[in-house]
Image (cartoon, grey):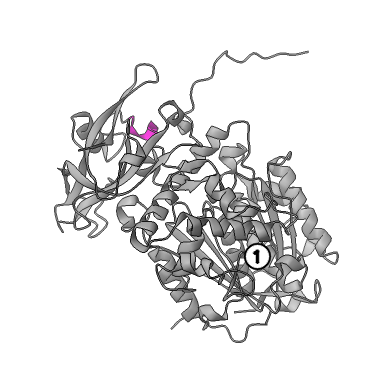
Amino acid sequence: MRNVAIVGAGITHFGRRDASWKDLVVEAGKALFDDVPNLDKKDVDSFFIGAAQPERWTYQTHVAPLAAELLGLKPRRVVARTESACASGQIAIRYAWLAVASGLSDVAVVVGVEKMNTKFMNLSQTSMMNVGNREFDTAVGLTAPPYFAMVAQRHMHLYGTTEEQLALVREKAGEYGSANPYAQFQKKITKEDVLKSRVVAPPLKLFDCSGITDGAAALLITSEERAREYTDTPVWILGGIQRTMANSINEMGELSDWLSLRYLAKDVYDLFKITPEDIDIAEVHDCFTISEIVEYEELGFCKKGEGGKFIEEGQSYIGGKVAVNPSGGLLANGHPLGATGVRQAWEITMQFRGEVSEKRYVSGAELGLAHNLSGMAQFHHIMLYSIKKPKDVKFGR
Amino acid sequence: MKEIVLPDTIPLLPIVDPWEQQDAEGPDSTKVYQFYKNLSEGKLTMQRCKKCGNVFYPPQAMCKYCNSTEYEWEEIPKTGEIHAFSALLLGFPMIIENFAPFVVAVARFGDYPKNGVQIIGIMFDTDYRSLKIGDRVEWEIMRIKGPGEKVRYWYCFRKV
């Protein structure tokens, strides 16, 4: 396999945007093109766009050629729209990595985008409901907040995790998010603010939840041979994999055990010959505060059941054991489904390039992990990014 | 200027109707039609494979353990135990907003997972503060009337 690098990155402001889906694609694309002035668009041979539900929120299907045209691209090798709900963006990056690593593609553009704020917010909620087995599990009105609320309830029941510990996750997100000019929520939120906020689905309150967000991000991904044409600071994509073991409520067993993530993380550490201790930055999928706590555990940053203690001890802050979500995560950035995975790669790229505010800069970071979950945590996804060039990456046993 | 005129009302899009797929018109409309027929007759059912004996849910047209397409419909035990619960108090989906807020619970019925199921149900007229993990619940069939003359069936939970 060839080495693959992120050689350029661009992002839009995240939030409730006065902008259409197409405007967001163009805005992220322009930010990317401004970042790589040497790019001749004719050299872009492949294009991937992560978009979860454009057909529901924008009534538009067949979005890959549409977005390619908006950006002035005429890709001729691999072109695809990727959909896996909340992880659509990360999958677009994975496909670009595979296409370039295989030698089929040399220069690929990746876009992640979602336009979620519409005139019909109840339709947005209906659309979100469809990520479960619609016919049998989610038709009853099971949206994400009550599902993750039940995960939190089980975690509290089994391990004594507290609402205060959940609130700390949001406080941390606000602390770093306040230094991220692209985040939807840039205000600092205290633990007390979280505990006092309106109950959405007990025990989760408004500030335990990420936002309904519009936004997009874009990357330029090339082979090692082409990387130096565009940048002196390539960010290497080590790669990543995915895992799903169950989809329906009946198959999920204990709701606070995310076995797919537990085994996925083990596989990632084996495959790439690293340990959780090697990770300097982890951009993880904190769609709810409880998600981040379960992720500390399943990613192996702490023992099962000790996620609450992990944040209480400050281990997931910059300067702790591992800097988790120095971008402010989904809680502060908001969560435009298809854009999130690409935003995480953008964050790690900017961190490695040293182009983020000092208040959220992870100094000396060399290895970054990006994690997404999709749907009701049925499906987990990890990518690894490194400042050091990979040597002899070989897969298979 | 040329003008075209649209109707005063546009019918509800099936894609926003949560029970659209359950509007099973007959055995040819879905291979799990029997599940809906059972619901309309007051029974909530799971499948048991005739070949390997495994139980599976949600309904589907093939045993995922041994690929057999021979299975029986078996009534899910009437009483189960709450594994987890919450309530939907904010952010209601379309249609659902007509009967929200409500409690949602995941409950286990029978000898889960080998000989039972873990399913989710709504609990109406229930204060979530009155519930705890381990409480006993029953499934009961609920009748969904509308829009218009449509009648469909689903299930919900009730504390016992």
* The magenta segment: B18-23
Q: Which residue is mark 1?
A: A326
- Which one is in front, A51 or A364? A364
Q: Residue at x 31, y 55 (%)?
A: A251
- Which one is in front, A225 or A240? A240
Give x and y (percent) for residue A303. Answer: 42, 73
When the figure is inspected, residue B97 is found, relative to residue A90, above or below; the finding is: above
Residue type, label 1:
Pro
Is residue B29 found left or right of A278 in the rendered image? left
Question: Which element is circle 1 on?
Answer: loop
Q: Residue at x 40, y 62 (%)?
A: A258
Q: Tell me which chain the residue with mark 1 is part of.
A: A
- Which one is in front, A163 or B36? A163
Give x and y (percent) for residue A130. Answer: 46, 43
Q: Is residue B36 visible?
A: yes
Q: Residue at x 65, y 65 (%)?
A: A326
Give x and y (percent) for residue A147. Answer: 42, 48
- Which one is in front, A181 or A391? A181
Location of the C terminus of chain A by quadrant is bottom left
